[in-house]
Image (cartoon, grey):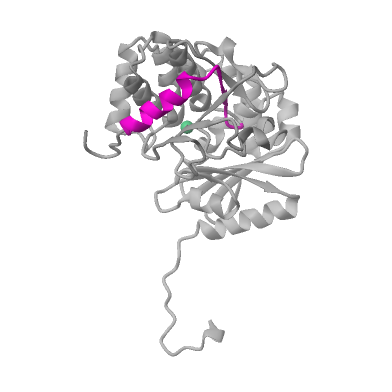
Amino acid sequence: MSGRGAWQLDPEDAVLALDRLRDARVVLMPTHQNVDADGLASPLAVRHALAQVGVEAYPVITDGDLPSNLRFLPGIESVLVYGQDPLPDYDRICLIDCADRKRLGRFSKEDPTRLDGRVPIVNVDHHVTNDRFGVVNIVVPDASSSAEIVAALLKAWGTELTAEIAQCLLAGIFGDTLGLRTPSTTPSTMRTAADLVDAGAALVPIVDNLFRLKPRSTVCLWEHALGNVQYAGPLVWTELTREGFRGCGAEMSEAEGLVNFLAGTEGSRAAVILYQDNDARGWRVSLRSLGEDVDVSAIAAVFGGGGHPRAAGVHIEGGPADRDAFLARVAELATPAIPATVPAGDDVASV
Ligand SMILES: [Mn+2]
């Protein structure tokens, strides 16, 4: 395999991961906060695969409810919702698509020792900021999605690629690549997608549920968000308040496509959406870069966040003044550096 974005799974890592999971009684697969298609469909695919070798595995939603647009995924009835469903007695953790094991919603917040390594963690991810916290780490930043990595992993495991598994994996790939449209989409992403369709994945439910169908509450939420759009230097930004969500009867996942919509705004360099926390003590922030010259994962890292160069996230604490200071700093960081033109011999103090 060669060409842009070519990567290969380390076969030894694949074997190690299977060894670590196959001898488990029960594998728990907590998903990242505000779970998306890749974050849920990839663990679901692994659940189906482990069932073939007689191992039980359960994906867990770690904050909020099951997003309604992901209910079409095969096996969704096995997904546990933290705080609603009792957790099974597990002896292995498999984190997929989780760059940061400390940000797993209430699962990590209510008992951080769950992720201190006492229960061995298998870590599968494609975020460049993943700090390889597992006993086995399969981290491939060049992969478009965790689902693309899992597709390679299951091939290495000799898993039978059923229609259910194919549907989960294609949903994950489509979710993260916006339907094979992002710069992270490579020829091999497309080949994997084609293989999944060959194996029985159905395109229409994926496109309908991830991109086309929306409840009226989503239109209401977008109206609210677009009505508050502001421009600050190189930034286009908006804020979604608790009242906005409540007034529209909308859930968090209904805002997902908004930041990508704003990221197409000509004349800006980065798009920012602030989602007010439920306790109003801060904001979850989504960042998107409009061009290759702005690395939003580097900007997010300044504030303790992370992600990909073109799409990143961070959490900020405080009130409106902290929010404004944050936006001013992000605007500064997204502004192209002006080459130094200070004439030789000039006094620094006069600059
Ligand atoms: Mn992902």
Quick check: 268 left or right of 163? right
Of 168 and 91, nearer the camera is 91
Q: What x and y, as percent, mark residue 7?
A: 30, 36
Classify the position of the N terminus by image quarter: top left
Name the residue located 37 percent from the left edge and 20 percent from the top edge.
154
Residue at figure coordinates x 37%, y 32% from the top left: 13
Please determine whether, in this image, residue 284 is positioned above or below residue 246.
below
Q: Percent from the top left, x then y, of residue 149? A: 38, 29
Q: Is residue 174 visible?
A: no
Segment colored magenta: 9-33
Q: Residue at x 44, y 20 (%)?
A: 171
Q: Does the magenta stretch include residue 186?
A: no
Q: Residue 205: x and y, percent?
A: 46, 13
Q: Residue furthest left?
A: 2
Q: Residue at x 40, y 11 (%)?
A: 202
Where residue 181 appears, x then y in whole percent?
A: 38, 31
**Foreground residue among 21 and 264:** 21
Q: Nearer the viewer, residue 238 or 54?
A: 54
- Residue 31 included in the magenta stretch of the image: yes
Left or right of 159? Residue 336 is right
In the figure, residue 241 lies in which quadrant? top right
Looking at this view, is 351 or 261 the one in front? 351
Question: Where is residue 102, by image quadrant?
Answer: top right
* Residue 274 is at least partly visible in this image: yes
- Give the vertical position of 54 relative to 143 (above or below): above
Total numbered badges shown on the rendered structure? 0
